[in-house]
Image (cartoon, rainbow, N blue to C red):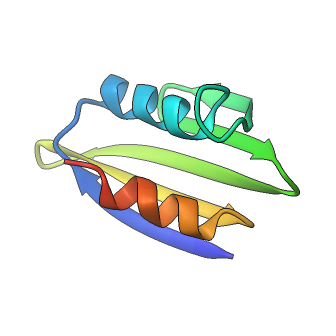
Amino acid sequence: MLNLEVRTKLSQGEAIQRLKKFFGKEGLGLNVTEEAPQCVVFEGGGGHVTATLCPEEGKIRITLMTQEWENQVKKFASGLP
């Protein structure tokens, strides 16, 4: 299990689109099981990825919690501007 926090200068909408592209059907093929303006939950492959977004001082703080997708979450986080 991994809990990772990262800040990005992307807008909240852009961040959610990147999350969906990376973890969703176009990327790793996980299913979106929950979606709200500040939260997206992906499940599949025996694990899950939960992303919570929060505006903070002109940036977006993304908290990523995962089980079974630790390396992929680190890769996603390292590619954010």
Give the residue displayed 27% in from the left and 49% down from the top: 80
Question: Toward the viewer: 81 or 65?
Answer: 81
Give the residue displayed 36% in from the left and 34% down from the top: 15
- Quarter of the N terminus within the rendering: bottom right
Lateral position of residue 48 relative to residue 75, left or right: right
Examine the rendered structure and indicate whether residue 51 appears above or below residue 10: below
Q: Position of residue 22 (x, y in %)?
A: 51, 38
Task: Report which quarter residue 41 is drawn in.
Answer: top right
Examine the rendered structure and indicate whether residue 78 appears above or below residue 50: below
Lateral position of residue 52 relative to residue 66, left or right: left
Q: How many marks?
A: 0
- Residue found farthest to the left: 58
Give the residue displayed 32% in from the left and 26% down from the top: 14
Lateral position of residue 47 relative to residue 79, left or right: right
- Residue found farthest to the bottom: 1
Lateral position of residue 12 relative to residue 37, left or right: left
Q: Position of residue 60 (x, y in %)?
A: 26, 45
Give the residue displayed 73% in from the left and 38% down from the top: 30
Examine the rendered structure and indicate whether residue 17 appears above or below residue 69: above
- Residue found farthest to the right: 46
Q: Position of residue 7 (x, y in %)?
A: 25, 56
